Image: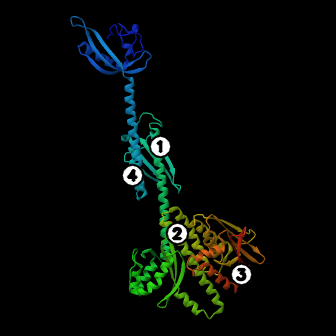
Amino acid sequence: MATLPHGTGAQSSYSGYEADEVLGKHISILIPESRWKEEDHILRMISDGNAVENFETQRKRKNGELIYVSLTASPVRDGTGKIVGASRIARDITARKRAEQEKERTSYLLNERIKELRTLYDSHQTLQDDRPINEALQEIVDIMPKGWQYPAVSAARIIYGDIEFRTANFHESPFSQRARIETPDSIPVVLELVYLEEKPQEFEGPFLAEERDLINMLAEMIRIYLTRKQEADALRNSEANLNATINNTTFFIWSINRKYELKNINQPFRNYIRDKFGIEVHEGQSITDIYRDGVQIEEFSSAWLSYYRKAMEGESFVVEEEYAGRYFKFSLNPIIENEMVAGVTVFSEETTELKKREKELSEANKQIDDLKLMALRAAMNPHFIFNTLNSIQYYIMENDQRNAVNYLSTFSKLIRSILNHSVVPKVKLNEELEMLRHYITLEQMRFENKFDFAFDVDPSMDTENIEIPSMLIQPYVENAILHGINNKTDRGILKISVKKSHDSILFEVEDDGVGRTATGKLQQQKLSDHKSYGTTLTQERLKLINTRRNVSFEIIDLEKDGLPAGTKVKIWIAS
């Protein structure tokens, strides 16, 4: 081994040895065993007369710490030129080397984060596409290995219930990282990433802490995707069922925008226009084209154009007309978007047969009351259905999937009740109360929970065996919501109570709205001939029912501190 020449200094600046500990002595003690072959190579070069400049290597301090040094070594010759030793200068470059290593480490970690972000981005893009679930999950599986530390030896799979998606190279491995989720319909989902060969131990086996975060984030993205997919499928199924109901009804249903262009058309309306006018209607077509060949333009301008304009001013109303001996009833309702009227929805029912039956049975006095009641119920049910469908259409147009699904579910239950009630003159009290609950729930959703609701039924009443006229209370509830509570600036409350009162059943519908006086003033700001259709029908029904059964009602204007504080309606039905 070479020795340090005399005059090197009192203490090595990097070795930790004092000068007298190293001068004139072999210095192999400063060389780690792993570097001995390297040292032999340097000595051979010096013995051959070659210098070694800026050679980076490692040395040990006296305390055993490994450090990095830059070594310059050259042969020492005597006067004859013979090599008699070696001269070395060592510079401590530990700080620089560690800084370089930290930079490399930082660069490596940055590249790992970039891979992870790319994996998340590619997965997000995949899950945004409207593709089948099996295609999306297989693509996520193929993307996953790219985000891990050792993509060349990575494989992945996703287990979705009983279905498995995997990369082509996947097989079971002890080096596995998993994440588990559960979909809203309780289907278990497992994401798994494996290394196909052993790798150095990290935070979680051979996996980094960031890779645990990555697989958890992918799992959450898939959970959200599957939830959204299931909600969208449910909404599509509900819409399909609703469209099937609308297209299989006897009603004609269509809507127009402010340019008088058709937007939504059901099949009965298409068939009627085709059979009557020989015109195949389609969305985007001007409503005037329908009348051009079948009805005089002047008639359209003077009648139907005025109807559309009236509805576009924000009013809902019903008109009955006769065309060539056929009778029709039309309900026009404004479509509200962003607190503005965006168009008009029209629901039409041909009443020719109804008119014919009424005329044929007009001579039978006993039967005429029942037929009038049934006709009025048939008129009321469409009126209520039209308003509800208008609200459902709003949620669908707003792409509010959750509210649309909830609304449609409640609406289907309500329609079932109405259809059942419409064919009988009387219904059980518990069935009528259930129908009211569904109706009020829909109105709460439609008005974004603007009011609270309290239902108080006397528990001693046998609601399953008491029968009452159907759809009798709903118009007063509707009136309390639409004209009382809806005109308030703050949150309102609706109270309905059902109890015994001597030999009668007493219904009380109470709201804390603006009161009838204020409502009347608001109505005067609209067209003067508008009147609540549901309430008018109900009052007429009460008159007819009273000929067969004792029914009475009272309307009370509520006050608080001398000011209007709502309305209470009392309805007595003989039990």
Residue with the mark numbered 3? 551
Crowd band around label 1 with a 10 angstrom C-alpha radius: few (<14), some (14–19), many (20+):
few
How far is mark 2 from mark 1, CA to CA?
A: 41 Å
Amino acid marked by disc 4: Glu
**Label number found at residue 392:** 2
Q: Can residue 321 be seen in this view?
A: yes
Q: What is the x, y in percent for residue 553?
A: 71, 79
| Disc nearest the viewer among 2 and 1 | 2
Judge by depth and name the residue closer to the eye, 194 or 67: 67
Disc 3 on helix, strand or loop?
strand
**Label located before the other in sequence (2 or 3):** 2
> Looking at the picture, does residue 39 appear above or below residue 353?
above
Give the amino acid at mark 2.
Ile
Q: Are marks 2 and 1 in contact (CB under 8 Å)?
A: no
Give the secondary structure at mark 4.
helix
Given contact means CB atoms under 8 Å apart, are the residues at marks 3 and 4 in contact?
Answer: no
Residue 197's tag is none
How many numbered marks appear?
Answer: 4
Q: Earlier in the sequence, mark 1 or mark 4?
A: 4
Scheme by which the image is coloured? rainbow
